[in-house]
Image (cartoon, grey):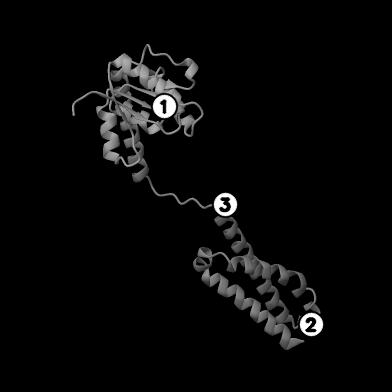
Amino acid sequence: ENEKFIFCYNLWSNNKEFNLIIENICQKYNVKNVVFAKKEDTIEDWLYNIKNAEFVITDSFHGSVFSIIYNVPFISVVKNYPGFSRFKTLLTLFPEIKNNIIFDMIDFNYTDFNIDWSSVNKKIVEEKIRCTNWLKNTIESPKVTYLSEEQKMYDAILNKAEEDNNKLEKEIEKLKNENRILSYTIKIPSLKRKKFFLLAQNIITLGLSRKKNKEKLNRINYILNEYDNYIKNKI
């Protein structure tokens, strides 16, 4: 049970390349037992194998990260696999692992996989503090509501409809007072009312905005109906 082993977690790499690395690492570390990750492994199994391995060989970002967390020597064969850019970010944060990330097998050598863990662990502590402070500040900061572009568009349509509604209502009142409805029958309904109907139809499809502005929508529909009735009665 306490026998030394090398843990292999291979997602994307060529098996021939992986086998070559395994062979060389086994010789270098004088380890005969090789444990391969299996689909049926639990998360606990996977973490146990990384934490207790003599060496980890992987092409996985998370396999690399947990090797760093547990201070286990490792090699990551990266190339252009999914998550490629994350490895570059990892190298930026931990330049100490530059010899442990392999982007091309041509550059691979078996001489130096040692990592300055004291330097790495210091940075891990610093990052934990930075992330904790960020989370704390984010949670405690006043909540800010950001409107999506779609919501902004809907609000603009609603405001425009309300503005046009007010103008139309004033014109109707003016016509009533001056008793000149017949002379304006052709001028008002044809263009303004068509435009107004389009705005109303857009607003009716707004979903959440419709509920939020129910009174405004009811007022718009009321004015349209009143205008229709007024025209019918006068013509």
Q: Is residue 160 above or below residue 103?
A: below
Q: Secondary structure at mark 3?
A: helix
Going from N to C along the chain, the mark reached first, 1 or 2, is 1
Classify residue 82 as left or right of residue 199. left
What is the distance, in whole Å, between disc 2 and disc 3 at their CAs? 43 Å
Q: Residue 228 at x, y = what percent?
A: 69, 81
The residue labelled by disc 1 is 90
Q: Quadrant of residue 234?
A: bottom right
Compare residues 111 and 235 and report the one nearer the observer.
111
Number of other residues with Cα within 10 Å of mark 2, as a class: few under 14, some 14 to 19, many 20 or more: few
Q: Secondary structure at mark 1?
A: helix
Q: Nearer the observer, disc 1 or disc 2?
A: 1
What amino acid type should be assigned to the residue bearing mark 2?
Answer: Leu
For the residues labelled 1 and 2, say whether their Cβ atoms are less than 8 Å apart: no
| Quadrant housing the N terminus | top left
What amino acid type should be assigned to the residue bearing mark 1?
Answer: Leu
Q: Residue furthest left?
A: 2
Q: Residue at x 52, y 72 (%)?
A: 215
Q: Is residue 185 above or below residue 85?
A: below
Compare residues 114 and 200 and report the one nearer the observer.
114
The residue labelled by disc 3 is 149
Q: Residue 51 at x, y = what percent?
A: 26, 29
Going from N to C along the chain, the mark reached first, 1 or 3, is 1
Q: Residue 102 at x, y = what percent?
A: 44, 21
For the residues labelled 1 and 3, say whether their Cβ atoms are less than 8 Å apart: no
Number of other residues with Cα within 10 Å of mark 3, as a class: few under 14, some 14 to 19, many 20 or more: few
| Quadrant housing the C terminus | bottom right
Classify residue 194 as left or right of residue 154. right
> Any mark on residue 182, and which?
2
Q: Residue at x 35, y 28 (%)?
A: 8
Q: Residue furthest top?
A: 111
